[in-house]
Amino acid sequence: MIDFRYHLVSIISVFLALAVGIVLGAGPLQANIGDQLSDQVAALRTEKQALNDKLTVSEKLVDASDEYAAAVQPRVVRGRLTGHRVVLVVLPSADGTMVTNLETVVPQSGAALTATVTLSPDWFDPTQSADRGQAARAAAAALGLGSTATGDALLLQVFTYLTVSTSSTSAAGATGTPAQRSAALKVLVDANLLDSTAADLAPSDLAVVVSGDYAGSDAVVSARSDAVRSLVTSLAGASRATVVAGGETVAAAGQAVTSNAVQAVREKSDTAQIVSTVDHARAGEGPATVVLAVEGALDEKIGHYGVSAGATDKVPRVLP
């Protein structure tokens, strides 16, 4: 049986150990511990400086790469889309610089930029469904379009007729007279569903959809992705080639899911097989990559370019 003397010895041992630790810490070991901590801090400072130096070099290399891409871009894309007409369809929250860069590269490729059409958030807002349906009916009537479709399906049909046609000439394949087309477009603009840089929008045979991020719950993002795929599929079916271009997705703080049009296309085989995508269109070589992707799609070579999930190649193969 353990008696009181055992407990007393144990307590004395604990205090002796504490005392020895204090004496050693304040005396012989103090200098060693201090030296070790100082060495570790110095090593961390050196490592941090080395990382900062590498980051600076990397940033300079990226800037140089972007400058080079901008310098050679006109030569890379020259004449690749000559004779074609391109419409830019800009989705909500798309990067403005990316849009400007694409507006610049299209004429460099030899194609005519018919317009930049920017969809408003109301285009995808589920609470605006009734208003969209009303605008769609009015626009269809102005266009002289007889259709049994209703709601968003009719709106998508009108929008597709206004923006794209498989003909590379502005008149051939156009639905409605120029006056009817302008009236229908004005209906959609006045309904705050879109904005267009051209009031008399002529159909294009090529479409470039500029992606923007969207976020929310799984259900919200899934519904938005479905709407994006319907839009892209409709454009692809009525054009000679449709490409979706975007930049890297930035996760929205406090939201369960963040996605974009590029991911929406890639995650479903039905759209991935008919529409090419570029997930690094914001980068220096991005605009040229989009042109090359369009050229490949015209040659029935559908690809998904970049570094994000679903990419099949980093860049398209440059055709002779």
Image (cartoon, rainbow, N blue to C red):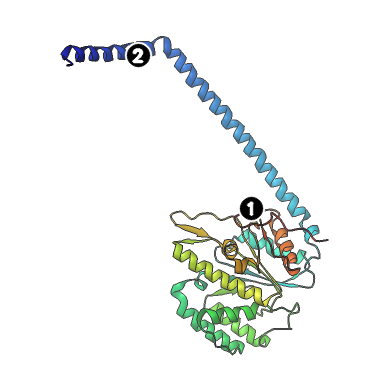
Closest to the observer: 260 or 38? Answer: 260
Query: On the image, numbered disc 1 is attached to which residue?
Result: 307
- Residue 198 in view of the camera: no
- Binning the other alpha carbons within 10 Å of mark 1 as few (below 14), some (14 to 19) or many (20 upward) gives some
Q: Position of residue 79 (x, y in %)?
A: 81, 65
Of the 4 image quadrants, the one containing the N terminus is top left
| Circle 1: residue type | Val
Of the 4 image quadrants, the one containing the C terminus is bottom right
Q: For the residue labelled by badge 2, is the local secondary structure a helix, a strand or a loop?
A: helix
| Circle 2: residue type | Gly
Q: Position of residue 287 (x, y in %)?
A: 70, 59
- Residue at figure coordinates x 53%, y 67% from the top left: 225
Left or right, 141 with respect to 284, comes to left
- Residue at figure coordinates x 43%, y 54% from the top left: 254
Identify the image quadrant of residue 53.
top right
Identify the image quadrant of residue 2.
top left
Q: For the residue labelled by badge 1, is the local secondary structure a helix, a strand or a loop?
A: loop
- Binning the other alpha carbons within 10 Å of mark 2 as few (below 14), some (14 to 19) or many (20 upward) gives few
Q: Is residue 108 above or below residue 136?
A: above
Number of marks in picture = 2
Query: On the image, numbered disc 2 is attached to which residue?
Result: 21
- Residue 223 in view of the camera: yes
